Amino acid sequence: MVIAEVGYLLEKGRIELSLSEVERYLSEQNTFTIYPQTLEVLKATFAIEDIPELHDRIIAGTARLLEVPLITNDQKIESSTAVETVWS
């Protein structure tokens, strides 16, 4: 979902990072995992009630399912009680 969000922001002209650049970066790193959108992810997503935007909820739901903190500076996600967030 994060990669879809990058594509969306690129389409809207809000970022200049291309999907090819993201793909190249991810192929060079071994610290990232592309996690599939499974039924378990969607269950975790729809258990979250305090993040209004669907794509943000899917990202948070994935983090919640995997029990990992989410790196974000999105205020609505940061104020959620459903997922731990960090921002560097």
Image (tube, grey):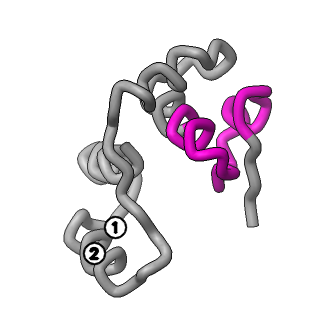
Place of residue 12 in the rendered image (x, y in percent of width and height, measured from the top left): 30, 43
At which x and y percent is residue 71? 65, 55
Residue 24 visible in the current orientation = yes
Residue 72 appears in the picture as rendered:
no
**Location of residue 60 by image quarter:** top right
Q: Residue at x 65, y 45 (%)?
A: 67
- Label 2: how many residues lie within 10 Å, few (<14), some (14-19) or many (20+)? few
Q: Which residue is mark 1?
A: 17
Residue highlighted by disc 2 = 21
Element class at badge 2 = helix
Badge 1 amino acid:
Leu
The local crowd at label 1, few if under 14, some if 14 to 19, many if 20 or more residues have their Cα within 10 Å, is few
Circles 2, 1 touching at the beta carbon (< 8 Å): yes
Amino acid under disc 2: Glu
- Nearest the eye: 80 or 9: 80
Whole-angstrom CA distance, mark 2 to mark 1, is 7 Å
Q: Residue at x 69, y 30 (%)?
A: 76
Q: Secondary structure at mark 1?
A: loop
| Relative to 83, residue 80 above or below | above
Q: Residue furthest bottom?
A: 28
Q: Is residue 20 left or right of residue 58?
A: left
Q: Which residues are magenta?
A: 60-83
